[in-house]
Image (tube, grey):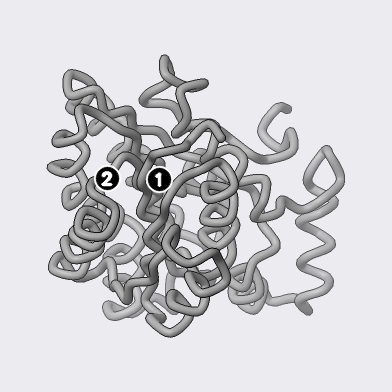
Amino acid sequence: MRLEGRVAVVTGGASGIGRATVERLVAEGARVVVADLNGRAAQETADAFDAGCVIGVAADVSSTDDCVRMVEAAVTRFGGLDILHANAGVPFTGPVGSVDDGTLDRVIDVNLKGAFRSAAAAVPALRERGGGSIVFTASLQAVIARPNYTPYTAAKHGVIGLMKGLALELAPDGIRVNAIAPAATETPMLSEFLGGMGDLPDEARERFRQSIPLGRMATPEDSAAAVAFLVSDDARMITGHTLILDGGTTAG
């Protein structure tokens, strides 16, 4: 119950890492706004919990108004905001020649600009509470690079820069800002990544698994546990940090 009395917003909260984070934050005592592009899925996620501790909100992080509205939902329903997990994202794999303007704009707009919009919307409410915590979902592609991910890799590298800049800017307000960088994770988005790898999905998945020294793919619960730690008082001296969840992949 490290987060008892805290209020959180989780973007992309209806599936994958976001859904696992909602479950973990609630288990730790938080009340949570599930913000997701799929409003029905957000509400279904909220309905899976005891009445009163989770609400669902339809929100597109490519819209500033939607980002403001999801924060207002937390303040109106729960009285404030202490935690933002800016997790919403879209995948991309493919060679540079397959990247048209619309694809490039969408990947950058959601993965990078959406993270910025979410944080900017949350900051006034966090300041009102005297501080808080922001955690961005980056990616292992935020600290390394592989071919055929270039727009996604660029966006996620940008998220790390965003995190570091905000960590320094918001430290005087008592707002800590960090990021998680998970390796390939068993989520619905993974299937979309694997579909663009040029291999059969099972072969691509096995190749990913074999590249991880611990010998397994990451799970959404791995990321959720890391987020719960970073937003808790156990991490009160940690800001401006990228917590890499890669099973040892970058150790060599």
Left or right? Give the position of 158 relative to 153.
Answer: left
Give the mark nearer the N terminus: 1 vs 2.
2
Tell me the kind of residue under disc 2: Leu
Do the residues bearing badges 1 and 2 touch, measured as CB atoms within 8 Å? no
Q: Which mark is residue 38?
A: none
Q: Position of residue 22 (x, y in %)?
A: 52, 56
**The furthest residue to the top:** 237
Q: Position of residue 239 (x, y in %)?
A: 38, 23
The quadrant of the picture occupied by the N terminus is top right
Q: Nearer the viewer, residue 219 or 90?
A: 219
Tell me the kind of residue under disc 1: Phe
Q: Which residue is the site of mark 1?
A: 136
Tell me the quarter of the picture where residue 209 sits: bottom right
Tag 2 secondary structure: loop
Q: Position of residue 204 (x, y in %)?
A: 77, 67
**Label 2 CA crowd tier, 10 Å (few <14, some 14–19, many 20+):** many
**Label 1 CA crowd tier, 10 Å (few <14, some 14–19, many 20+):** many
Q: Nearer the viewer, residue 91 or 226?
A: 226
Q: Residue at x 24, y 47 (%)?
A: 119
The answer to whether residue 96 shows anywhere in this view is yes
Q: Is residue 114 above or below residue 28?
A: below
Q: Which mark is residue 81?
A: 2
Q: Position of residue 185 (x, y in %)?
A: 67, 57
Q: Residue at x 16, y 34 (%)?
A: 127
Tag 1 secondary structure: strand
Q: Is residue 240 above or below residue 110?
A: above
Q: Residue at x 24, y 63 (%)?
A: 73
Left or right? Give the position of 184 relative to 86.
Answer: right
